[in-house]
Every structure is written in structure tokens, then in C-alpha cells.
Image (spheres, grey):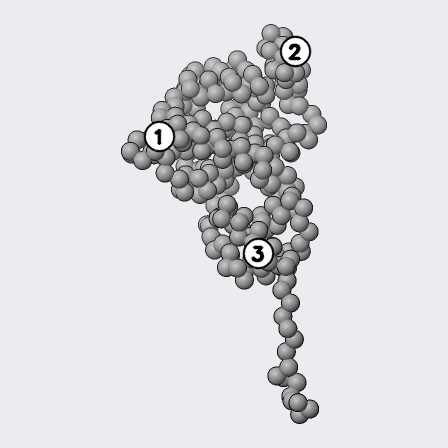
Amino acid sequence: MVGQHRSVQQRKLVENTYRTRLATRLRTLSRKHPRRGWRYMQDLLGREGWRVNHKPLRTVWREEGLKVPQIRRKKRRIGSAESGILRKQSTRKNEVWGLDFIFDRTADGRPIKMLVVLDEYTRENIALEVSRKLKSHDVIMVLDELTAIRGAPENIRSDNGSEFIADVMKEWCKESGTNTLYIEPGAPWQNGIVESFNSRLRDELLSSEIFTTLAEARFLCARWRADYNHRRPQRALGKQTPAEYAAKCEVSAARRLVQRMEMTGNTRKAASIMIAETS
């Protein structure tokens, strides 16, 4: 024993309970958000009360084999459109609503059409209408409901789809005092905030679920939307959820719209918006 070399001497390994709990929680969160990386998991752990440095978190993340492959995407030039998100950015709540459609199918092969309405400043998904068919009148019904709750937006950004350039849609925008920001044809990156939301919706829900009925699709979309708005922090919002960020906006866009309506003499519309704001 006296002549034993130091290289063969080993200490008894003590189990790291903190690492075990961290790895278990990371595996649980990874199964719930399979397309998210370690930075997003760090934000979620921080909201749950964990105090973990990014270096040991990355080590555990890789040792558990939870690394998400990087996806390289080509970049496009911003183009010359004055209505794109880079040249016409939203600076306050209710200033710009982004509209777009996204499509899927039920198990029997019948199509599903979804209307996405996003507040570009707060990143809130304020509407996710799911139906077999959606025409311009259906879009107006959704916007009427949202306007009664939040007030009319100052601008609407969308593509040049027939539902968005219809005469009834233009008439609604004129009556509500809303401007239209149409992006260039074939340039979806000019409506990039909504397109980013669509890709997340497609990746995390539509590509992972088989909808047997329209009612099931509506239920799952509503549940995903609630999770997106109230439980998922975003780094663009200072690691706050869209609902938390919207609640902290000091100035209401609806009240500014009321002032603008009163200045133009449209007191009836201003009164309806004010009632919706106070309710």
C-alpha cells in the first residue's frame, strides 16, 4: 500500500443533486418545446425561480443530448417598399396590426384557413380565427370584435390578398380611421413579424398535430395562442410575455385614437372606442 501510485487513487463520486434536478427539468421543458434552444430554456427556468449560469446550463444541455440543430436561412434585401417593417416600424401599442392567413388540413383532407392578427409592438396574437373558409366579410367581423375590445388600430399591414384589398375592407378602414400598409407582392419578409409568428405556429403546432375535426383544430389553436401570449417570454420584449409587456404600456393607443377622432369631429366613433377602453 505504501508503494501505490497516485494515479490509481480515486475519490468516491458524490452525486450532484442540483445537476440531476436541472437535467430532469430541462428534459421536461425540451419535450414541451422541442424546437427551442438552451437560451429559451434559461428564460423559462428564470421565470420559475432557478438561478443558473449559462455555462453550466449549456454543459448539461449538451450532455443530455438536447441540442437543437441550427437552421441557416438565406437573407434578402429589404427592398424599396415604404410599408415594410424596416421602414415603417411600430413604436407603440395598437399602432400597427399585422394580418395574414395560414393554411392546414384536417385528417379527412379538407382545408383549414386561419386568420392571424398580431399587434406588432407588443407581439400579442390578438386573434387566431380558424374556419373552413374566410372571406373579406369574415375578416371585417373579426376586426369589428377586436376594435370593440381594444379600439381601432392606426395601421394594418398585410399582403395584397383578395380578402385584404376588397372594397368592403377599404370601406371599413376608412370608417375606422385606419391606414393600410400593403407589402410588395412576393415579399413576405416585409411583414416579417407576422411571418415569424406563422413559422412558430407551423413548427410547434400545425406540423405536430393531426386535426380530426374543425372543432379540435379550434381548441388546440386557442390553447396554443393562450400559451404564446401568457406563458412564453420573448427576448425582444425583455424576457417578458406579450401579455405582460402589453400590460406595462403606459399610453393607450385607443385613447390617442379617441383624441384624433374628436379633433376630426367624429365624436360618435370616439365615444364607442372610449366605452370599449373603459370596459
Residue 277, visible in the rendered structure: yes
Percent x, y for residue 145? 51, 18
The residue carrying pointer 1 sits among few (fewer than 14), some (14 to 19) or many (20 or more) residues within 10 Å by Cα, namely: some
Percent x, y for residue 94? 60, 25
Tell me which numbered mark, 1 or 3, is placed earlier along the sequence. Answer: 3
Q: CA–CA distance between discs 2 and 3?
A: 58 Å
- The residue pinned by badge 1 equals 213
Give SS at disc 2.
helix
Tell me which numbered mark, 1 or 2, is placed earlier along the sequence. Answer: 1
Q: Amino acid at mark 1?
A: Thr
Residue 89, visible in the rendered structure: no
Of all residues shown, which one is farthest toward the right?
Answer: 250
Percent x, y for residue 98? 51, 30
- The residue pinned by badge 2 equals 262
Q: Amino acid at mark 3?
A: Ala
Asked if residue 203 is positioned above or below residue 279 in the image, the reply reads below
**Which residue: 56% across, 30% down?**
119
Of all residues shown, which one is farthest toward the bottom?
Answer: 3
Q: Quadrant of the C terminus?
A: top right
Asked if residue 8 is positioned above or below residue 95 in the image, the reply reads below
Q: Amino acid at mark 2?
A: Glu
Give SS at disc 1.
loop
- The residue pinned by badge 3 equals 23
Give SS at disc 3.
helix
| Quadrant of the image occupied by residue 254 | top right
**Which residue: 57% across, 40% down?**
232
Nearer to me, 63 or 54? 63
| Quadrant of the image occupied by residue 264 | top right
The residue carrying pointer 3 sits among few (fewer than 14), some (14 to 19) or many (20 or more) residues within 10 Å by Cα, namely: some
The residue carrying pointer 2 sits among few (fewer than 14), some (14 to 19) or many (20 or more) residues within 10 Å by Cα, namely: some
